[in-house]
Image (cartoon, rainbow, N blue to C red):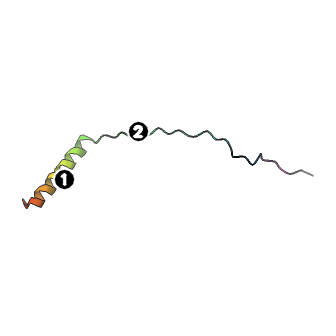
């Protein structure tokens, strides 16, 4: 007859933290800057009644 299984203690397991290095500096591409500038100019001209 087999005895009871023993899986360890009640203490929290020691696990090495997973280190994730994310690149937090993102630069906008040249096309994105042009689109943003055109959108701002269009909004300003629209508010001024140019269209």
Q: Earlier in the sequence, mark 1 or mark 2?
A: 2
Residue shown at the point (14%, 52%) measured from the top left? 41
C-alpha separation, residue under disc 1 versus residue under disc 2? 28 Å
Which SS does the magenta portion mostly show?
Answer: loop
Quadrant where the C terminus lies? bottom left
Relative to 10, is 27 above or below? above
Q: Residue furthest front?
A: 11
* Residue 27 circle label: none
In this figure, which residue is indicated by the disc labeled 1?
Answer: 39
Viewer-proximal residue among 24 and 30: 24
* Side of 20 where 34 appears, left or right: left
Instruction: Give the percent coordinates (x, y) of residue 19.
Output: 53, 38
Instruction: Give the percent coordinates (x, y) of residue 23.
Output: 41, 38
Q: How crowded is mark 2: few (under 14 residues within 10 Å), some or many (20 or more)?
A: few
* Side of 12 where 4 appears, left or right: right
Instruction: Give the percent coordinates (x, y) of residue 18.
Output: 56, 40
Q: How crowded is mark 1: few (under 14 residues within 10 Å), some or many (20 or more)?
A: few
Relative to 27, is 39 above or below? below
In magenta, the rendered stretch is 3-7
* Side of 26 where 8 appears, left or right: right
Instruction: Give the percent coordinates (x, y) of residue 27.
Output: 30, 40
Viewer-proximal residue among 29 and 50: 50
Residue shown at the point (89%, 50%) measured from the top left? 3
In this figure, which residue is indicated by the disc labeled 2?
Answer: 23
Tag 1 secondary structure? helix
Tell whether position 15 is magenta.
no
Q: Which residue lies furthest to the left in this view?
A: 50
Tag 2 secondary structure? loop
Residue shown at the point (64%, 41%) measured from the top left? 15
Relative to 20, is 3 above or below? below
The reply to whether discs 1 and 2 touch (Cβ–Cβ < 8 Å) is no
Viewer-proximal residue among 28 and 13: 13
């Amino acid at each position: 007859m087999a005895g009871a299984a023993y899986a360890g203690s009640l203490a929290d397991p020691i696990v090495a933290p997973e280190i994730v290095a994310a690149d937090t500096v993102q630069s906008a591409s040249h096309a994105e800057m042009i689109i943003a500038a055109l959108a701002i100019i269009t909004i300003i001209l629209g508010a001024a009644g140019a269209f």
